[in-house]
Image: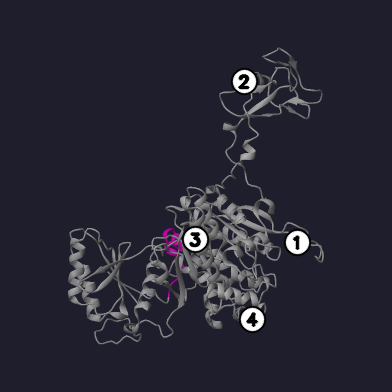
């Protein structure tokens, strides 16, 4: 029953595709769990499949490396901002703001949030040459390691490593940066989920091919064109660049529903009820089409005056004679107040589709523009922000959220920028009976032009921060947006989740490596886990429990085992601290029997903080323990 896991330095993202292969083609894996492509191909070839190597697709320098990054282990731990998260407005919040490299964070979330996200919106670097994007990678592979892991030649491995260290902003660099993030993001989407990606002309062609590869060409939904400025730039070199794009793909198009746009009061005002029809307000529509059709010309009589009507020469009625006569009998045709007007059909408001199909054209009049977005941010933060990335307007992001999510869904933005997505969700929730929640991820990058010193100093003073970063801007914006809603709309915000929790990535300890693999009593551990402080153990616990499938917003219960504190969440008991004794073991077994709310299916221990004899005793006791609840309890050692 003992399960030993080198988890802390091997935190790999979830790979459900591999699980499917193991379930259906288990014989194609060797004893070490390695997938044997030759056996798999032979299995498929027996079904007479065509394995031609020629196909249409996207290739670039770094493609194999980017695939490796998508499955490579995380190199960080997750740490909680306990002081902030314990504030009353944040304690029970389901919203998250995460600080760090979004690839690392996506890997950490891939188990706990697998197929939990309904909608993703991202506004990644556009790679314009002036937005500061360069590819940077702190992972260190030797040529031989990359050859083995990526399955490439020595020459190509050398070229890839040179490329990853060159701080390039080529198309290949951008694709290598984007691929692993999109690959993991797909795993987080629900089966009926969608992803929206903002982009401009610099990378839109590459992005479409990349999205086809990751999500499947068959899952393409739409390419929206957003009018980002409301006037022509006459100083443009060639033509005025007035638009950007928002690409939309689905996880599974057959499951996706894109919500309708709400009807406006102006639209509904066109419906009246001048004849007091009991079916309610209606608007008139044409019964004549502008071309000739066989049997499309015939006479009808006004039921009020008997006046005869027919279509003009060269035209036809839009319905058959039988159908038109039935409409007249059902009072669905209007002949004017006096019964002598040319007939028109009645379209009842109650029967009109309660919403409008969204258009791919997003004009700035209805969906905002760049200057509006800057004003919105400045109104909350103050100062003249000098950012390389212009934020998106709330009206645009709110529109996308309405199209792609329901009122209780989880929405993710892992290029959160200055927090427009979170701000938009708060406003939408308060404007209706909605309870959407968000996960925002942002790197703490300094992107301000310090040469414009007055604005920079103003921003530092406003935030009370020595070196403002985009993350701090996002955090402050969410706080101030919530406070503004509390002040201006106290009734609507009652009971709404306006808080959020903050977590960040921290590097693994430099000297971290697992202890000896034996349980000999006198074998000293190479890694001194007993030297870790309370904060270190808490970060280790948060990282482990998230990897085990518990959301970051789910709080663990502290269990007192006779003076030794364990952490219990989702039927898992984590024993992280040192000085675990036989007395604590006895208390643990007694609680399993007596406590109705304590039903651990697994006991997970931090091996470095346990003596070998206590590990053996705990393992044997759980193996032989017969409890009143008939629980089978796994014993897992991690290092």
From the image, which quarter does the C terminus lie in?
bottom left
Callout 3 secondary element: helix
The answer to whether one can see residue 118 in this image is no
* Residue assigned mark 1: 241
Q: CA distance from mark 2 to mark 4?
A: 75 Å
Residue 1, quarter of the rendered image? bottom left
- Asked if the stretch drawn in magenta spans residue 17, the answer is yes
Color scheme of the displayed model: one colour
* Residue assigned mark 3: 483
* Residue assigned mark 4: 166
Q: CA distance from mark 1 to mark 2?
A: 53 Å
**Residue furthest front in the image:** 487
The disc, 2 or 3, on the residue closer to the chain's N-terminal end is: 2
Circle nearer the viewer, 2 or 4: 2
What stretch of residues is rendered in magenta? 10-28
* Residue assigned mark 2: 331
Residue at the spot x=70%, y=66% of the render? 202
- Asked if the stretch drawn in magenta spans residue 455, the answer is no
């Amino acid at each position: 029953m003992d399960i030993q896991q080198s988890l802390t330095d091997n935190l790999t993202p979830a790979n459900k595709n591999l699980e499917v292969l193991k379930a259906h083609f288990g014989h194609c894996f060797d004893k070490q769990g390695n997938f044997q492509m030759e056996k798999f191909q032979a299995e498929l070839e027996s079904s007479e499949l065509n394995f031609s190597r020629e196909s249409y697709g996207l290739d670039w320098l770094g493609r194999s490396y980017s695939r490796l990054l998508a499955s490579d282990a995380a190199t960080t731990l997750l740490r909680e901002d306990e002081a902030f998260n314990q504030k009353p407005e944040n304690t029970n919040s389901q919203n998250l703001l995460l600080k760090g490299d979004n690839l690392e964070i996506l890997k950490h979330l891939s188990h706990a949030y697998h197929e939990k996200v309904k909608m993703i919106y991202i506004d990644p670097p556009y790679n314009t040459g002036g937005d500061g994007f360069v590819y940077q990678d702190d992972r260190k592979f030797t040529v031989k390691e990359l050859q083995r892991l990526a399955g490439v030649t020595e020459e190509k491995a050398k070229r890839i490593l040179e490329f990853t260290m060159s701080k390039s902003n080529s198309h290949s660099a951008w694709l290598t940066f984007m691929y692993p993030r999109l690959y993991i993001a797909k795993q987080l989407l629900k089966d009926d989920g969608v992803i929206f990606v903002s982009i401009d002309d610099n990378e839109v062609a590459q992005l479409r091919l990349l999205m086809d590869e990751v999500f499947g060409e068959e899952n393409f939904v739409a390419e929206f064109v957003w009018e980002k400025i409301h006037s022509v730039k006459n100083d443009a070199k060639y033509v005025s660049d007035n638009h950007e794009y928002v690409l939309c793909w689905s996880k599974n198009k057959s499951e996706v529903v894109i919500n309708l746009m709400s009807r406006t009061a102006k639209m509904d005002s066109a419906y009246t009820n001048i004849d007091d029809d009991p079916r309610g307000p209606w608007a008139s529509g044409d019964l004549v089409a502008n071309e000739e059709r066989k049997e499309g010309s015939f006479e009808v009589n006004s039921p009020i005056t008997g006046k005869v009507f027919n279509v003009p020469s060269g035209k036809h009625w839009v319905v058959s004679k039988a159908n038109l006569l039935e409409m007249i009998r059902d009072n669905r045709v209007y002949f004017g107040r006096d019964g002598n007007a040319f007939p028109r059909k009645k379209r009842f408001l109650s029967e009109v589709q309660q919403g409008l199909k969204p258009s791919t054209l997003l004009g700035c009049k209805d969906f905002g523009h760049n200057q509006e977005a800057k004003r919105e941010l400045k109104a909350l933060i103050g100062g003249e922000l000098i950012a390389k990335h212009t934020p998106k307007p709330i009206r645009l992001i709110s529109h996308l959220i309405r199209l792609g999510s329901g009122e209780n869904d989880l929405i993710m933005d892992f290029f959160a920028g200055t927090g427009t997505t979170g701000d938009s969700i708060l406003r939408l929730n308060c404007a209706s009976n909605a309870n959407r929640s968000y996960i925002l991820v942002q790197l703490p990058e300094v992107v301000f032009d310090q040469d414009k010193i007055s604005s920079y100093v103003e921003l530092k003073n406003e935030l009370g921060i020595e070196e403002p970063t985009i993350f701090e801007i996002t955090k402050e914006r969410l706080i101030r947006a919530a406070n503004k809603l509390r002040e201006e709309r106290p009734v609507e915000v009652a009971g709404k989740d306006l808080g959020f929790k903050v977590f960040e990535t921290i590097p693994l300890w430099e000297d971290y490596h697992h202890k000896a693999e034996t349980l000999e009593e006198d074998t000293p551990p190479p890694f001194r886990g007993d030297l870790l402080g309370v904060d270190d153990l808490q970060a280790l616990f948060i990282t482990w429990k998230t990897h085990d499938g518990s959301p970051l917003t789910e709080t663990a219960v502290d269990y007192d085992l006779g003076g030794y504190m364990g952490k219990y969440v989702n039927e898992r008991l984590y024993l992280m601290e040192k000085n675990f004794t036989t007395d604590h073991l006895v208390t643990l077994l007694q609680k399993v029997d007596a406590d109705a709310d304590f039903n651990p299916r697994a006991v997970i221990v931090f091996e470095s903080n346990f003596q070998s004899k206590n590990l053996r005793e705990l393992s044997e006791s759980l193996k032989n323990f017969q409890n009143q609840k008939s629980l089978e309890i796994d014993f897992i050692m991690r290092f």
